[in-house]
C-alpha cells in the first residue's frame, strides 16, 4: 500500500459516510468509487484493503472478480456477488425472498433451474437484478460491493452493474470497482464518467516513485542497499508495484548483494517475471508442473485442483506436488491469500502470460479436455460451453449437443447473446444434416431481439435445409413471419406464410399458419386486398367452435376485423366473447400477445372500457411475472392509457402513456412500440388542452412522415393531422387526412370510433368547403350508427353539429349529449355539453360541462367552458374531487336500471357508466365486477 494514502483517505471518507447512514433510511451514504490503472499498479491489493476495512466496520461485503477466461460465461460476476448471500436458502425460502422475481432472476444467478415457458427479456432480467441488489442492500445495510478486474467481467453482468451504478448514491451502498482503462468495454462507460465525492471519476493509480521502490527494496534486503541499486530497481520496473515486489523477492531468494555492482543484474531478474523469462522459469519446474500450470491458465480463476489435474492428465499426488512447486515459485498464490475458493494465480499478468505461451494446438486440446472434465464434474453444459467456444470444429455430435444444451439454458436464463455465440459455434462444428435446420432455428430464436436481419437469414437457411419434421418446419415459418413483421416487413411476413400453407398437410397445422397470416395481414397498412381477406376470415371464423387456442385466435381476429369495418357492435362483442372463453394468455411461449390485445381493444371501441381494462391488467400482470419489461410492457401501458383516455380519465391516461413512452425509449425510436406511445400521449395532451406541449413532444421524437407500415391505433397519420388542426394548420391537416382516406377506405375500414378521420377532415375543410364538411360528418354519423356504440355516435353528432348550419346544431348536440350520457366516454360528454351550453346560452348545461371537464382532467376545455359560463353570468360550480368508486345512491340507481325500472334514465346513470366503463347493456356484469372488486 505504498503511496496510496490519498486513495485510502477517499475510501475511509466513503466508508465513514456509508456507516453513518441509518439502515432504515437508505439513500444518504452511498457512492461509487472507481479505480483505474494498467496491469500491476496495485488495484487488487487496494481492493483487498477496501474489503478488510469494510468488514472491520461491520459492513456486508459483496465481492466479485472478472476473469479473462470467464468473459463468455453469462452472469459470472453477478453470481459471485449475489449467490453467496442466497445460496444457503431452501427453495421455499428463496421463493419467499425473491417473490415474483424468483423465476426471472433465479436461473441467471444459478439459484434454480429455468422454468418452462418464454424466457424473460434482457431488460426485465436487469430490472430483476436491480430489485435483488436493492433489496439486499436495504436488508443488510450498510453494504460494500467490490468488483475487481471489471474490464474482464462478462457483458451481461457488467452492463447491468454499469446501469445500476448511479443508484448507489441513493442507497446505503458503496460500489467499488477497479479496471484497466484501455480494456474497459463500451457498455461500462458509466464507470468512467460518474461524478462523486472525489471530484472526478475514476481515480487513476500512479506508478510508485523512486523513493517508494527504494523503501520496498530496503525492507526486503536490508537498509544497506545502496542508492544506485535501488534506483536501478525502480528503473527496470517502471515503478510498477507488482513487478517491484516480485523483483525484491527474487533479489532476496538469490541472495544478491544490493550494491552498485549488482545493479546491472536486475534487468535480467525483472525480465524473468514476465514473458519468455516467466516461461523459462516455469519450465525449470518440470513437465508435470508445466502441464498443471497450463491447465490452470485455461480454467481461469477459482480453479478446483481436481479439475485442473483432470485437464492436465495428472493424478492427485502429482497435482498436489505441482501446486506446491507453483506456490513456491510465486506463480500460484499461497492458501488464504485469496478470498475465492480454489486455486488462483498470484497476479492476472502471470495467468495471461502463461495462457498465451501455450502452443496453439495444445491450448485448443486443453480447452476440449476442460469441457469434458466440466461435464464429468457435474458443472453443466454452460461451464463446458465456454471451453468449446475455443476449440476447432471437428464434426463432433457431442460438441453440438453440449453447445445446444448450454444455449437453451442461457436463453431461458435471459442471456440470448451468449446463446447466440454458442449456437453459431455449434453451426461451425458442423451438426449432422438432419440436425442443421434445428440449430439454425435455435440460432434465429437467440438472435431475434438483437439481430433481426441475421435472424431472417438463419430462418430462411433453415427452411432451405432438407429435413422431415413438420412441427419444426411450422415453428420456423411462424418465427420467420414474426421477425419480419416486427421489422416492419409485414407483406413479406404474410407471403412467407402463404407459401407454406398449401404444402401443409395436417389440418390443424394449416389452420395455425392461416391464423398467423390473418394476424399479420390485419396489421399491414398497405394490404392489397383487405376486403377479400376479411371475407375469408369471416367465412372461416363463423364455422369454428373455439375448441382450441388456434380457433379462438382466429375468432379474436374476426372480432377485431368486424370492429374495424364497423359491423354492429353486438356482432363484434359476440365474437370477442367466443374468443375469450376461456381467457387468452398474453405471455404464451409459442404465440404473440397481439390477438389478446386486439380482443381487449374491441371492448373499448364497443363502449366496454371497463372490461378492456380488466383484460389489460391481466395481460400486464402476465408480462411482469414473465419478466417482459421492454416492448411488451410498453404496449400494455400505452394501450391502457388509451383506454383511460376513451373513458375520460385523462390524468391517469397521461401518467400511463408517459410510463409506456419511457419503456419504449429503451426499446428504440421509430419502432412500433414507440409509435404507439407517442400517438397516445399526443392524443391525451391535446384532450387536456396542451397543444404546444404535444407539438414539442412530436418534434422531439420525430413524429411525422414517414409513418409506419404497420397499423397503429390510434392511427399515427390521423393523430398527426389532429395535432396540425389544433395548431390552426387546416390545409396541412386536410392533406394528411385525405391521405388517410386513400389508405383506409380501400381496405374497408369504416368505423369512425376506430379512426375519426372523416370528422377531423370535416373540421379542417369547414371554413372553405362547408357543404363537403357537412357531407363528411353526415357519412361519419351514418357509419357510427351502423356500428352502434353510443360514444362513437355521440362524437360524430357533436362534430356534425360543429360544421352544421346554426339552426341544425341544437338537435344534433342534444342527441349527442343524450347518447354520451349513456356511454363511458367522459371527455366526449364534456365536449358535447360545452358545445350545447354555448349554443343554447344555458348556464346549467355549461356548469355541468365545467364539472365533467374537471372530473376528466380536460383543463383546456374546463377553462373554455368556465369562460363561457362566467360570460353568461353563471356561477362557477365547486365540483367535488373525482371519486371512482360508486356512491350508495349510484349503486341503487344502477340496480334499479338492471331491473329495467323505467324511472331510471340513461342521463341519471352517466356517472355510473363512466366509472364502470360500460353502457346500459353491460351494466349488470360491470356492477357485479365492481362489487367483487370492492369486496
Image (cartoon, rainbow, N blue to C red):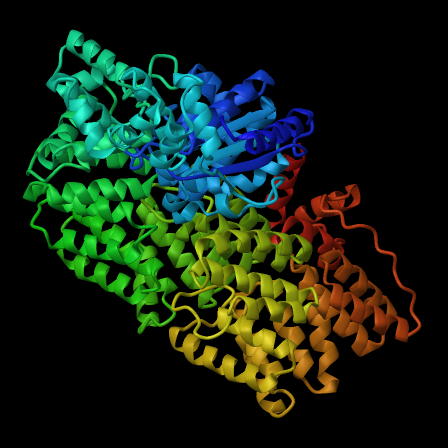
Q: Is residue 760 left or right of residue 266?
A: right
Question: Which residue: 15% across, 20% down?
Answer: 284
- Marks counted in the figure total 0
Q: Position of residue 831 (x, y in %)?
A: 71, 69
Q: Position of residue 261 (x, y in %)?
A: 30, 27
User: In the rendered view, would you say 893 is above or below 777?
Assistant: above
From this viewpoint, is residue 548 visible? no
For residue 588, what is the image quadrant?
Answer: top left
User: In the rendered view, would you say 575 is above or below 259?
Assistant: below
Which residue is nearer to you in this view: 226 or 447? Answer: 226
For residue 925, what is the image quadrant?
Answer: top right
Which residue is nearer to you in this view: 193 or 548? Answer: 193
User: In the rendered view, would you say 881 is above or below 710?
Assistant: above
User: In the rendered view, would you say 445 is above or below 55?
Assistant: below
Residue at the farthest top position:
317
Q: Position of residue 729 (x, y in %)?
A: 61, 83
Question: Which residue: 68% across, 80% down?
Answer: 802
Amino acid at each position: 500500500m505504498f503511496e496510496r494514502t490519498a486513495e485510502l483517505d477517499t475510501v475511509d471518507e466513503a466508508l465513514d459516510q456509508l456507516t453513518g447512514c441509518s439502515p432504515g433510511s437508505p439513500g444518504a451514504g452511498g457512492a461509487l468509487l472507481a479505480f483505474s490503472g494498467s496491469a500491476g499498479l496495485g488495484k487488487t491489493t487496494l481492493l483487498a484493503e477496501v474489503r478488510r476495512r469494510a468488514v472491520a466496520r461491520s459492513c456486508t461485503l459483496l465481492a466479485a472478480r472478472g476473469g479473462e477466461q470467464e468473459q463468455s460465461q453469462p452472469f459470472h460476476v453477478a453470481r459471485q456477488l449475489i449467490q453467496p448471500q442466497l445460496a444457503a436458502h431452501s427453495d421455499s425460502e428463496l421463493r419467499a425472498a425473491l417473490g415474483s422475481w424468483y423465476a426471472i432472476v433465479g436461473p441467471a444467478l444459478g439459484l434454480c433451474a429455468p422454468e418452462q415457458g418464454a424466457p424473460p427479456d434482457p431488460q426485465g432480467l436487469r430490472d430483476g437484478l436491480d430489485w435483488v441488489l436493492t433489496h439486499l442492500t436495504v436488508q443488510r445495510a450498510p453494504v460494500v460491493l467490490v468488483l475487481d478486474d471489471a474490464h474482464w467481467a462478462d457483458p451481461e453482468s457488467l452492463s447491468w452493474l454499469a446501469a445500476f451504478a448511479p443508484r448507489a448514491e441513493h442507497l446505503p451502498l458503496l460500489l467499488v470497482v477497479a479496471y484497466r482503462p484501455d480494456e474497459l468495454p463500451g457498455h461500462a462507460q458509466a464507470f468512467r464518467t460518474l461524478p462523486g465525492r472525489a471530484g472526478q471519476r475514476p481515480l487513476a493509480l500512479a506508478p510508485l516513485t523512486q523513493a517508494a521502490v527504494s523503501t520496498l527494496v530496503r525492507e526486503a534486503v536490508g537498509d544497506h542497499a545502496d542508492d544506485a541499486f535501488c534506483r536501478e530497481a525502480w528503473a527496470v520496473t517502471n515503478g510498477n508495484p507488482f513487478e517491484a515486489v516480485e523483483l525484491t523477492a527474487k533479489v532476496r531468494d538469490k541472495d544478491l548483494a544490493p550494491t552498485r555492482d549488482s545493479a546491472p543484474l536486475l534487468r535480467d531478474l525483472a525480465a524473468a517475471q514476465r514473458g519468455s523469462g516467466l516461461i523459462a522459469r516455469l519450465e525449470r519446474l518440470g513437465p508435470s508442473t508445466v502441464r498443471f500450470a497450463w491447465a490452470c491458465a485455461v480454467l481461469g480463476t477459482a480453479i478446483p485442483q481436481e479439475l485442473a489435474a483432470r485437464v492436465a492428465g495428472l493424478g492427485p499426488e502429482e497435482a498436489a506436488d505441482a501446486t506446491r512447486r507453483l506456490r513456491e515459485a510465486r506463480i500460484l498464490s499461497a492458501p488464504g491469500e485469496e478470498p475465492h475458493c480454489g486455486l488462483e494465480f498470484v497476479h492476472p499478468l502471470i495467468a495471461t502470460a502463461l495462457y498465451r505461451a501455450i502452443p496453439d494446438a495444445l491450448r485448443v486440446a486443453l480447452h476440449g479436455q476442460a469441457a469434458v472434465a466440466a461435464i464429468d464434474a457435474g458443472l453443466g453444459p454452460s461451464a463446458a460451453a465456454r471451453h468449446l467456444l475455443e476449440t476447432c470444429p471437428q464434426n463432433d455430435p457431442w460438441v453440438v449437443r453440449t453447445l445446444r444444451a448450454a444455449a437453451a439454458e442461457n436463453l431461458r436464463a435471459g442471456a440470448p447473446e451468449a446463446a447466440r455465440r454458442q449456437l453459431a459455434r455449434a453451426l461451425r462444428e458442423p451438426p449432422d444434416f438432419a440436425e442443421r435446420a434445428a440449430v439454425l432455428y435455435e440460432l434465429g430464436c437467440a438472435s431475434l431481439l438483437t439481430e433481426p436481419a441475421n435472424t431472417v437469414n438463419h430462418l430462411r437457411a433453415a427452411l432451405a435445409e432438407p429435413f422431415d419434421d413438420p412441427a419444426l418446419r411450422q415453428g420456423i415459418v411462424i418465427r420467420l413471419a414474426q421477425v419480419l413483421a416486427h421489422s416492419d416487413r409485414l407483406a413479406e411476413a404474410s407471403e412467407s406464410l402463404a407459401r407454406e400453407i398449401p404444402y401443409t398437410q395436417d389440418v390443424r397445422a394449416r389452420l395455425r399458419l392461416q391464423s398467423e397470416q390473418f394476424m399479420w395481414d390485419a396489421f399491414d397498412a398497405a394490404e392489397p386486398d383487405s376486403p377479400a381477406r376479411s371475407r375469408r376470415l369471416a367465412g372461416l371464423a363463423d364455422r369454428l367452435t373455439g375448441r382450441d387456442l388456434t380457433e379462438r385466435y382466429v375468432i379474436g381476429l374476426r372480432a377485431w376485423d368486424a370492429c374495424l369495418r364497423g359491423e354492429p357492435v353486438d356482432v363484434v362483442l359476440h365474437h370477442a366473447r367466443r374468443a375469450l372463453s376461456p381467457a387468452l394468455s398474453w405471455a404464451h411461449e409459442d404465440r404473440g400477445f397481439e390477438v389478446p390485445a386486439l380482443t381487449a381493444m374491441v371492448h373499448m371501441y364497443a363502449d366496454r372500457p371497463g372490461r378492456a381494462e380488466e383484460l389489460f391488467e391481466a395481460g400486464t400482470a402476465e408480462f411482469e411475472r414473465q419478466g417482459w419489461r421492454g416492448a411488451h410492457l410498453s404496449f400494455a401501458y400505452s394501450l391502457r392509457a388509451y383506454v383511460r383516455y376513451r373513458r375520460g380519465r385523462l390524468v391517469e391516461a397521461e401518467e400511463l402513456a408517459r410510463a409506456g413512452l419511457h419503456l419504449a425509449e429503451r426499446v428504440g425510436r421509430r419502432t412500433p412500440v414507440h409509435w404507439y406511445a407517442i400517438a397516445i400521449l399526443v392524443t391525451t395532451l391535446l384532450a387536456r388542452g396542451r397543444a404546444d406541449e404535444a407539438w414539442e413532444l412530436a418534434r422531439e421524437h420525430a413524429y411525422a412522415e414517414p409513418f409506419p407500415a404497420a397499423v397503429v391505433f390510434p392511427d399515427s397519420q390521423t393523430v398527426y393531422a389532429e395535432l396540425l388542426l389544433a395548431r390552426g394548420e387546416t390545409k396541412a391537416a386536410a392533406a394528411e387526412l385525405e391521405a388517410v382516406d386513400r389508405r383506409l377506405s380501400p381496405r374497408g375500414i369504416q368505423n369512425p370510433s376506430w379512426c375519426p378521420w372523416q370528422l377531423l377532415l370535416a373540421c379542417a375543410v369547414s371554413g372553405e368547403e362547408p357543404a363537403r364538411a357537412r357531407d363528411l360528418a353526415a357519412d361519419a354519423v351514418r357509419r357510427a350508427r351502423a356500428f352502434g356504440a353510443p360514444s362513437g355516435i355521440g362524437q360524430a353528432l357533436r362534430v356534425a353539429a360543429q360544421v352544421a348550419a346554426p339552426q341544425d346544431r341544437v338537435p344534433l348536440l342534444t342527441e349527442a349529449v343524450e347518447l354520451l350520457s349513456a356511454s363511458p366516454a367522459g371527455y366526449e360528454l364534456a365536449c358535447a355539453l360545452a358545445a350545447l351550453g354555448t349554443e343554447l346560452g344555458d348556464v346549467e348545461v355549461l356548469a355541468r360541462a365545467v364539472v365533467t371537464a374537471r372530473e376528466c382532467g380536460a383543463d383546456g376545455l374546463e377553462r373554455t367552458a368556465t369562460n363561457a359560463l362566467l360570460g353568461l353570468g353563471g356561477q362557477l360550480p365547486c365540483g367535488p374531487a373525482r371519486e371512482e368508486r360508486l356512491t350508495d345512491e349510484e349503486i341503487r340507481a344502477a340496480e334499479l336500471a338492471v331491473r329495467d325500472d323505467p324511472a331510471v334514465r340513461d342521463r341519471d346513470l352517466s356517472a355510473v357508466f363512466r366509472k364502470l366503463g360500460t353502457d346500459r347493456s353491460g351494466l349488470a356484469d360491470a356492477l357485479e365486477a365492481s362489487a367483487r372488486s370492492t369486496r
